Image: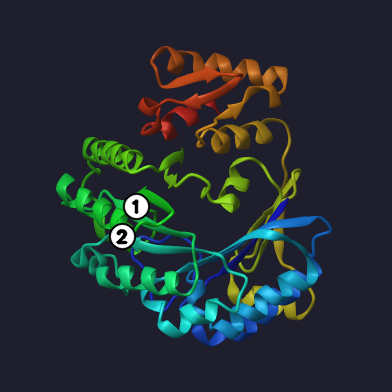
Amino acid sequence: MAGIYIHIPFCRSRCIYCGFYSTTGLEHRQRYVEAVCKEAEERKQGTGVGTIYLGGGTPSQLTIVQLRQILDAIYIYNKVSDDAEVTIEVNPDDVTDEFAQGLQGLPVNRVSMGAQTFDDERLRWLHRRHTSKQVAEAVGRLRQAGIRNISIDLMYGFPNEGLSDWEHDIDCALALNVEHLSAYCLSIEENTPLWKMLKGSGEQDEEMERAMYEILIDKLTAAGYEHYEISNFARPGYRSRHNSSYWNGTPYIGLGAAAHSYDGHTRSWNIADIHQYIEGMEHGERLFESEVIKGDTFYNDMVTVALRTREGLNLSQLSDEHRDYCLKNARRFIDDGLFKINNDHLSLTRKGLFVSDMILAELVKI
């Protein structure tokens, strides 16, 4: 079944590390909601919809009424499965009693929360608005509202962060007993405030980051989580169905400014400008670019996406030419214990996970 992603670009303030398209122009929210609803009508799906994902930005910066308006449009114009996974990303401090109770009137059944760290000093350094205490409070409110599928995001690799600091963050996350955890190494994206702040201050400590990643895998695996993608861990039965659709090539449409879509043959992306997006939709014109995915591009997409997962790349889905190319370039990594082949699937070993970016770059065809 297809998935639908809705990009909500609004943020009350910008975090120093974020490279995603966002805006602090909250006065445009209602016009934007109406534009998204219009795009949903124009791009309604003839096939069933199995997942819906409200991402951002900060979707919890919309009111419950505005969220209902968007989701109503999705359900009106599409055949949504009765057991669809419906996810919303939230900031902990937005999850008030009123907001959590409001979710009960929506089809939302999964919440992804950006905790990032349980160290208040680091949260302030990131320009995050919440405190560590608010993360636990938000989880409690969501549970009371009937949400039984909660994911939290963590970050590691902060300047001057030690292994004990990282273990503390993991332990705090585990104490919340959530169904899903995503953990990402702090990435310094070009032209972000963080990039400007750390420019010229030296390279990140890769050995420390590797040790942190190893600790992450050990602690979450011991706690019963399945390590099903490089950065993602889930209790049995709680993998992110929506994100998994990206990794296994399931078609999806993206609504909103900067949102991407994929129909199995073509990839497209809406204009990354909220004003032009709104004006375009108000005049009945979707402003976007696209490219046809075929040949080497299709192969490269499969390699860089499928190999992030536990199951890996299904070699039988490749053409003979691309299969030969892939195996030829993967051979030395197999010999080094970074890749393994099982049931015609090529996948990363634990040893290969941390250096996945380097390995995958060697497999793509330029």
Q: Quadrant of residue 212?
A: top left
The residue that label 1 is drawn on is 188
**Cα–Cα span, label 1 and label 2:** 6 Å
**Front position in the image: 113 or 35:** 113
Dot label at residue 194: 2
* Quadrant housing the C terminus: top right
Rendered view: 148 above or below 97: above
Q: Amino acid at mark 1?
A: Ile
Q: How is the image coloured?
A: rainbow
| Residue in the picture at 43% in, 32% down | 356
The secondary element bearing badge 2 is classed as: helix
- Which badge, 1 or 2, comes first in the chain's sequence? 1
**Front position in the image: 38 or 280:** 38
Count of numbered circles on the image: 2
Rendered view: 167 above or below 129: above
Q: Position of residue 313 (x, y in %)?
A: 59, 28
Q: Position of residue 269 (x, y in %)?
A: 66, 58
Q: Position of residue 244 (x, y in %)?
A: 58, 46
Dot label at residue 265: none
CB within 8 Å, label 1 to label 2: yes
| Residue in the picture at 39% in, 54% down | 190
306 horizontally vs 189: left or right = right
Q: Is residue 201 visible?
A: no
Q: Amino acid at mark 2?
A: Leu
Q: Which residue lies most toward the bottom here?
A: 27
232 horizontally vs 257: left or right = left
**Front position in the image: 351 or 1:** 1
The secondary element bearing badge 1 is classed as: loop
